Amino acid sequence: MTTTITSPSLDLAAPPTRPTRDSFWTRIAAELAEAIARGVYPPGERLPSEHALAEQYGVNRHTIRRSLASLSSQGLLRVTQGSGTYVEDFAVELTLARRTRHQQSMAQAGLRGVLRVLDAGTVRATAAQARALQLPARSALLRLAVLGEAEQAPLHVGERFFPLPRFERLEAVVRETGSITAAFTAHGVADYTRRESRVTAQMPEPALAAQLRQPATRPVMLVESVNVDTEGVPIEFARTWFAGDRVTLTVTHDE
Amino acid sequence: MTTTITSPSLDLAAPPTRPTRDSFWTRIAAELAEAIARGVYPPGERLPSEHALAEQYGVNRHTIRRSLASLSSQGLLRVTQGSGTYVEDFAVELTLARRTRHQQSMAQAGLRGVLRVLDAGTVRATAAQARALQLPARSALLRLAVLGEAEQAPLHVGERFFPLPRFERLEAVVRETGSITAAFTAHGVADYTRRESRVTAQMPEPALAAQLRQPATRPVMLVESVNVDTEGVPIEFARTWFAGDRVTLTVTHDE
DNA sequence: CGATATTTGTCCGTATGTATA
DNA sequence: GTATACATACGGACAAATATC
């Protein structure tokens, strides 16, 4: 089990800024969060409807919605139109290490990982892509848009770029096997390692949120990474968006 | 300069779910994002006021606010009450590696880093903390709440736990020098390395957002990390919240 | 399967408060 | 102090998704 990464319930020190009189929605959000923490609403449980909460707290429904939106984006709640608002339970732990393998990460988490090719094509490298892959600008690249799933639930989606003509037949193999590693092997790459990963937190665009099947109110993690072969030659540049909802990234530094 | 981590403007493939007719606020957000991308509103520029935008798009001001909130949480805009809405420019790159040193990371980014102690005290280890530090449950720990700044701007804030009585005098040294490394040295720890880091994206609580001086609408990155001395004995367990606004984490895997 | 009620999502309009210039 | 701009809150209406009968 993962050590629970709780919401930042820190009273690190008094806020250095203003002693603003809290707004209604802030106070209500805090009260609901505490109720959830104390198990009044256990994981999976449905909260009272917005209408009911509004009545209960004596505020307008919009005010309640503001509170719920906040808690939802902090990862405590999941809101579903037409159904209700539910208390969330927690996330899959993925490993980001020198020898990162998608399937392995999944297996580690006790899940069966599937990699699906959404789209494929040939593109010319942008300046940034060329730099990452140590190629001349505007080199030809194979672009794969892929979706990583486990137990029906999408965990990440992204685009991966491979130098051409070296990896010309890659798409077919990935589609067949659902594995990048297998495809590399088929291209004579016996082994490869991850050189670097860059992580940022973002709010997803609606389309991205839909693909990851997570609310647009919850953050995603964008990981930009470069894989190199045993010679140190870059063979893949990837931009992967992870569902912040369901994924924790663990970076191990031991060698 | 960092390779620009742009917002996920991906048309990876058609959304697998529904062809929902986009809402007004979604379409307006997309149009504004494109205008920003094309330089119609360059970084630092002030957008027209909400009132003006509402008129321009022929919608209610609240609809515009929904669009701006979305773009703001994606990191494209910064909204300031009483002043206006501005196009953002980008982030500091911090390194997360086996030999992570706060001051070094800062220097790398061309900044003068300062570490300030917000609060200090003695606590008893929770189960999770004890496990991370390989100590018996409820062991005595020194807890430091620290704030990392560069150029007046807070970059991260967090709490760090150190085993007692080994690091009894740590607080004083950190307060004096503003450096954890220096404090470890003073305690006879010649060298130390980071064993593991766990990264999640969250929306900040209002208090945290205030401390990081970033809007509560933008995600933060929570990094849980363990540092060990040369013997492999854990000496620090830290939970650090990074301003998603201003920070990119780079994980290097090369040894 | 279809009809209906429930629940959340979007949008409008208005009013008042608060921060900034 | 005044004007401007964003923040919060209220009330109402209808749409869209879901659940239920």
Image (spheres, coloured by chain):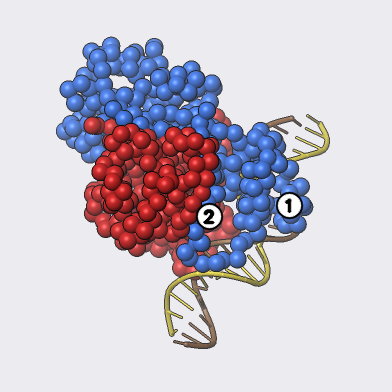
Chain colours: A red, B blue, C brown, D yellow
> Image point 59% across, 46% down: which residue?
B71
Q: Amino acid at mark 2?
A: Asp
Task: Name the front one of labels 1 and 2.
Answer: 2
Q: In screen coordinates, is B104 left or right of B27?
A: left
- Residue depicted at 39% across the width and 22% down the height: B102
Instruction: Judge if badges 1 and 2 mark residues of a common chain.
Output: yes
Residue B54: numbered disc: 1
Q: Secondary structure at mark 2?
A: loop
Q: CA distance from mark 1 to mark 2?
A: 28 Å
Looking at the picture, tell me which residue is in the foreground, D13 or B246: B246
Which of the 4 image quarters holds residue B172? top left
User: In which quadrant of the rendered image does the C terminus of chain A lie?
Assistant: top left
- Residue visible at 43% across and 46% down in the picture: A164
Check disc 1 and give the amino acid type.
Answer: Ala
Earlier residue among tags 1 and 2: 2
Where's residue C13, x and y in %? 75, 59
